[in-house]
Image: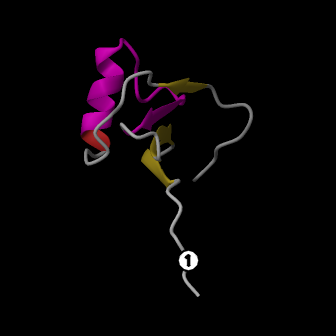
Amino acid sequence: MFNLNENNQFFISNAPTDMRVGVNAMCGKVRQTGGDPTDGKVYVFVGKTRKVMKLLHWERGGYVMYYRDCRKKAKTL
């Protein structure tokens, strides 16, 4: 489980994606492009501002979705 490494193939969406959607909607986006979300490849989606990213990956037993928020939070002293 949670097995991402350099042997995985990564496919990056070139259009901004609504980051509020879940696994089923992300699978639908992959299928719209002719892909198969259960093929073991990693599908990368980014939000409109390119500050939020989701990775969709099929592993033995089900889907894994990784979420990364790259926004910097201001720190005050």
Decide if residue 68 is on the left or right side of residue 10: left
- Quadrant in which the C terminus appears: bottom right
Picture quadrant where residue 17 is located = top left
Q: Position of residue 55 (x, y in %)?
A: 48, 41
| Amino acid residing under circle 1 | Lys
Question: Residue at coordinates 51% horizontally, 68% vertically from top-left?
Answer: 73
- Residue designated by label 1: 75
Q: Nearer the viewer, residue 71 or 55?
A: 71
Give the residue at the far top of this rendering.
Answer: 34
Whether residue 24 is in magenta: the answer is no
Q: Is residue 62 visible?
A: no
Picture quadrant where residue 35 is located = top left
Q: Position of residue 15 (x, y in %)?
A: 37, 23
Give the residue at the far bottom of this rendering.
Answer: 77
- Residue 23 vs 74, above or below: the answer is above
Picture quadrant where residue 25 is located = top left
Q: Nearer the viewer, residue 74 or 62?
A: 74
Question: Residue at coordinates 51% horizontally, 26% vertically from top-left?
Answer: 12
Specify start and end residues of the magenta stretch as a single range.
25-47
Give the residue at the far front of this rendering.
Answer: 77
Whether residue 29 is in magenta: the answer is yes
Q: Is residue 38 visible?
A: yes
Circle 1: element type = loop
Q: Position of residue 39 (x, y in %)?
A: 49, 25
